[in-house]
Every structure is written in C-alpha cells, then in structure tokens.
Image (spheres, grey):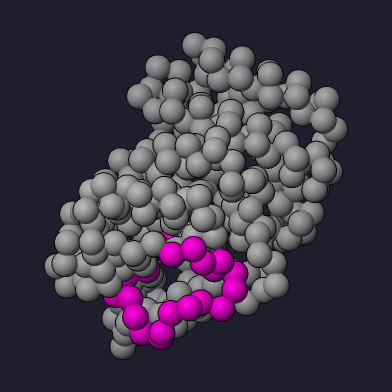
Amino acid sequence: MNNETNTYVVDHRSGAEMQRLIDQDHLMNQTMGNLFPGDTDPSSLHSVLDVACGPASWILQVAFKYPHIHAVGVDISKQMIDYGRAFARVRKLHNAELRVMDVLQPWNFEDITFDFVNARLLEWFLKEQLWPPLLQEMLNITTPGGTIRSTEIITNETNSPAFNQILALIWEGWKRDGRAPQTAPNAYVGAGTKMGALFAQAGIPVSGEQEYHLDWSWGAPAHQQIMRDIVVLYTLMQPYLVNTVQVVKEQEYQLLLQAMERELYAPEFKGIWHYKSVWGRKPL
C-alpha cells in the first residue's frame, strides 16, 4: 500500500503511550457497551480481526466472551503485541492470535477470511490518501455478508482555551502533512464525520451508525481518565508539532501544556468527547 512504515504522531514504543492506550481502550470498551453492533449475532461469527489493535483490549474481550471465535489482532508495535500475548497466555485465551503487522503494507491474510473486521481511531496514523486502500484491504479479507466497522472521533468539545488552541495546532499539523485536506475548514473535524462517505467510495453499503458523547467535565466519572489521556498524549505529541510539522515553537507549546492542565483541573471545566461508529456489510 505504501512505503512508510510508521506515520503515527507519537512514539508508539513509549511506555507512557502503551499505558495511555490501555486506559483509552478500556474506556472506549466501557462506553461502547456491546462488543458488536446490535444487528450482528456473535454466535454466527467464526473469525474476527481487529486492525491496528494497540494493546488488544477489544479483541481479547472478544476472545474471552466468545471462545468459539478465532480472534485476531494486528499492530505495528511489537511492544503492544507482546503485552496482548502475555495477557492472552495468563487468561488462557487459546482462540486469540496477535501478530505484528504494518497495515500500511500489503496484508498477510488470504482474501475472504474474516466475518467481522473492526478498526478504531486510525486517523492517528492514517493520512488522507491512505483511507481508500486501507478500506479496500479490509473489504478484500472480509467474507461476503461479513461486517466492517470503523470508529473514529468527530470532535472533542471543551471550554478550555489552551486545549482548544492545541487542538487547532494539531489540525493545522494534520493539514500540513496530509492527514486532512488543505481545503478543510480551520476547525478540527475528525474522521468520524467522513466514514459514511469513505465506506460508500469503497463499495461498502452502510448498514448502521452509532454516535457516542462522553462527558468528561469536572466531576464527571470520565473526567480524571480522559484528562490523564489528553495530558499524556499532548505531551508526547510535542516532537511532532514542534519538529515534524513545525506549527508551534517549543517554549510556546510548553506554556500551552501548563495552561491546559490548569484549565482541565478547574471546577468550571466542561468537556464532551464525540465519536462515531459506522459499519456495513460486504455485498454477497
């Protein structure tokens, strides 16, 4: 698909990033509730793939809850896969298979292999022009009548000026390095807003959509967890924003991080994370 081996905006080998993704996985699993969409019968599934699975929380939950399913997860990070494998061994999840794989390269799977293909938050490493070939790979390895689901951010809405300024810097960086089109509006618009159109372009008829609106305002149950996620992520993004896309100077960014952390801790802080799942079935 592409000669690049890693387009992730932070160092995926970092221990801090691994812990952040583990926490984020657990929160998303909890917020989304069921492991599969309501129109999918897990008893009819034989083989399931999680694309860029990170620490493999979702696919390992699938393996645990549905022992009849061959549950496969792939990720570019050996550290993430090693963590997932160790967890699977401890839990004796013999139906779980985790592989180190760069999904931006040709996939090492036979066509028509998986009944359900899952992916989420791919925009953190996927540039604009890579969405169509990636969805085509997902379509190729899905069985006729099988389901493909993608879950992506719509936006993160807050009353923190510093948070909003950093989000604007990220969006400018996205536009500079091809993660978003140059013609995109100035405000951040996540990939969750375009998945329906991308599915249609790939020839995947959309059969369902689900939006999630996670309140992380001060005092909300998710406040501390998402705040930690944001502080770690935005700190780890400094090399990308300062050196790679050069949208901000280091000292200015450090001051923004400090101001953001103060604002996220304030009792008047309000924040809602909006994201969306889109799924469709491969034509028979």
Q: Is residue 37 left or right of residue 246?
A: left
Majority secondary structure of magenta residues: loop
The N terminus - image quarter: bottom right
Q: Please report the bounds of the magenta region as a residue range.
A: 99-121
Q: Return the residue nearer the eye: 153 or 17.
A: 17
- The mark total stands at 0
Query: Is 30 in the magenta?
Result: no
Q: Residue 259, image x and y in percent?
A: 68, 18
Measuring 27% from the left and 72% from the top, which residue is drawn there? 47
Looking at this rendering, what residue extends furthest in the top direction?
Answer: 267
Position of 166 with respect to 282 (left or right) is right
The reply to whether residue 213 is visible in this rendering is no
Q: Is residue 250 left or right of residue 43?
A: right
Q: Quadrant for the C terminus, please.
A: bottom left
Residue 110, horizontal then vertical, whole percent: 41, 84
The picture quadrant where one finds residue 252 is: top right
Q: Quadrant of residue 177?
A: bottom right
- Work out whether residue 102 can be spotted: yes
Q: Position of residue 260 (x, y in %)?
A: 64, 22
Q: Is residue 177 above or below residue 224?
A: below
Residue at the (21%, 67%) spot, across then down: 69
Residue 115 is inside the magenta segment: yes
The residue shown at (79%, 54%) is 176
Q: Is residue 114 above or below residue 20?
A: below
Where is residue 43 shown, x and y percent of the image? 14, 67
Q: Nearer the viewer, residue 67 or 43?
A: 67
Q: Residue furthest bottom?
A: 284
